[in-house]
Image: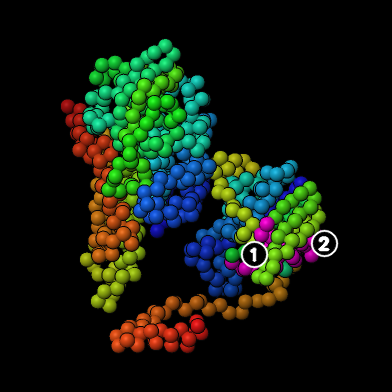
Amino acid sequence: MKIVVCAKFVPDATADRRFRSEDNTVDRAGVDGLLSELDEYAVEAALTVKENGDAEVTVLTVGPEQAADAVKKGLQMGADAGVHVIDDAIHGSDAVATSLILAKALSKLEADLVVFGMGSTDGGMGVVPAMVAERLGLPAVTLGSEVTVDGTTVKIRRDGDLASDTVEGTLPLVLSVSDQANEPRYPSFKGIMAAKKKPVETWSLADLELSGDQVGQAAAWTEVVEVTARPPRTAGTIVADEDGSGAAQLVEFLSTNKFL
Amino acid sequence: MAVDRLLPTEESTDLLDLVRDLCEHELAPYAAKAEESEAFPREAFRTLGKAGLLGLPYPEQYGGADQPYEVYLQMLEEIAAAWMSVGVGLSVHTMTSYAVATRGTEEQRARFLPDMIGGELLGAYALSEPQAGSDISSMTTKAVRDGDEYVLTGTKSWITHGSHADFYTTFARTSADPKHGISAFHVPATSAGLSFGAPERKMGLTGSTTTLVNFDQVRVPADHLIGAEGDGMRIALSALDSGRLGIAACAVGLAQAALDCAASYALERKQFGHAIADFQGMQFLLADMAAAVESARATYLQAARRRDLGRSFTQQAAIAKLVCTDAAMKVTTDAVQVLGGYGYTRDFPAERYMREAKVTQIFEGTNQIQRLVISRDLLRSVR
């Protein structure tokens, strides 16, 4: 079975994150980045399937040069190969264009099982798995919080607010997993060393028979017209209980701000 | 604050990422509670073992990571900054494998090392005795050859990981010769006749268990002798040179943690309408702490690079141990000062750092012994 994990390189949420002033896109080049933590669950899900059967796991990413780190992390965790789609024309692509690039790459890879995380930690839209499935004409079982693969049958449990449902599909299909699906493994020293020897291919848009005008900022269906930095946090309100009215003031504050 | 490290290779940079990830998610969140409740962090060592971090400086063919000391010590520093008991434990464990790795026969290395450094086993180093601390030559634990076995009898003290370890790298007397009468043995924890004293009630490193280890007619196969009979003193002293570098790195990690704690507190704490970090008196205190940490780090790295190049490093290791642990004592004490009254409470980690720092001036050779080593080397070279 050929499993492909679609993984995204995102700015580190614990470090400085910003938008580029010239085009209002997320600055991916000048900041610390990493494999999206939500995609680690997808890598783990793929590796678990591999451990329980015969499969090869490829990590696929679309992004600038630094995005190679996302592939590397996947390989260190235990994936077998990597593909990095990189092209200057991709900069500024929206979810629709991203799904086009991924779908082309997945067709080329002849994936049996495509695994996504539940969303990216930067864009956070969570729509790409469904878009890719649509483009490929494959069933999509998404947001699995428990995944079992038995032969060609993939069964997931989706946990909703009111109920959990079990959804089943047959390979080939597109799967996305939630952050409840598993406990992503850490790489090990052996994994780090082995990753250096694993094959990583670099593909351009031309390799996917796509042209620059099909993707990128100009082709995006939406545009970020303005970016305003979040104002710095203001000092909190301190309720001093000097005359015994502290409790009343506290209740007043909470109810005025609709916390009660 | 993440320390901006200069590492020699891409793989060591990746290794640092892994170590930091583990420190942040698997060690730091559990340290304070485990130290408070004196719970031995066995699981933390398993986690390090799974990640392949229990044998960083040893050959890859035996399950190690083949990293130079320059890299191993910086990983150790990171781990000690997150949790000192685990950092010290890793340093001790690394030293326990030293005898087999450097003086063992090829057969012993192939048999013992994969589990010691490439698995999840934890080691202890049984050298000190109640009456033989700094003066190793007054050791009385005996190993007597009996057919295909050695029979070990005696008591070891201050044994880190006592009762939790899977093996004890043990030094015992095989003859009365003060310098050439000591031998090294690999003693599995399952050996009959091994027993342990109650855990010492220590001032700090309370998560790390320290006990007496009693050897009551403990029999080990003769092929568990490491090196030749009588090689023990040389092995122990040579392992100590490397062990001292480990403790030096742990001390710097501890000092860095205290500095980070103090600096972030100073930015938050307001007095007289200002963050106390705005006052020059506080800035100078923090600056001195930062200078102590940075210069201590440079000192152990210099010794490590000498070791990695195959140059002598006994004197440099002793200097590093002295400088780094004295720096840790000073910086952690100053961190308590920066936090003021809060620093004196157990609600903040500064007081724990200060308690943990004290022992680094004592174990792996007291700082007075380090001065002996340094002056002996110095005067020998001048004469």
User: Would you place residue B69 above or below residue B214 in this image?
Assistant: below
> Which residue is at 60% across, 47% downward?
A77
Q: Position of residue B120 (x, y in %)?
A: 50, 38
Front residue (pair A179, A3): A179
Q: Tell me whether circle 2 and circle 1 mark residues in contact (CB < 8 Å).
A: no
Q: Which residues are magenta?
A: A122-146
> Which residue is at 35% across, 45% downward?
B250
* Residue of label 1: A119
The kind of residue on which mark 2 rests is Gly
Q: Can residue B271 be seen in this snapshot?
A: yes
Check residue B139 in the rendering and tell me which mark sits there, or answer none.
Answer: none
Q: Position of residue A45 (x, y in %)?
A: 66, 52
Q: Position of residue A29 (x, y in %)?
A: 55, 62
> Which residue is at 56% across, 47% downward?
A187
Q: What secondary structure is found at the residue carrying circle 2?
A: loop
Front residue (pair B187, A221): B187
Residue at far top of view = B147
Q: Tell me if mark 2 has few (under 14), some (14-19) or many (20+) residues whose alpha carbon lies within 10 angstroms of its own.
A: few
Position of residue B232 in the picture relative to residue A39 (left or right)? left
Check residue A137 in the rendering and tell me which mark sits there, or answer none.
Answer: 2
The kind of residue on which mark 1 rests is Gly
Q: Tell me if mark 1 has few (under 14), some (14-19) or many (20+) residues whose alpha carbon lies within 10 angstroms of its own.
A: many
User: Would you place residue B377 above or below residue B85 in this image?
Assistant: above
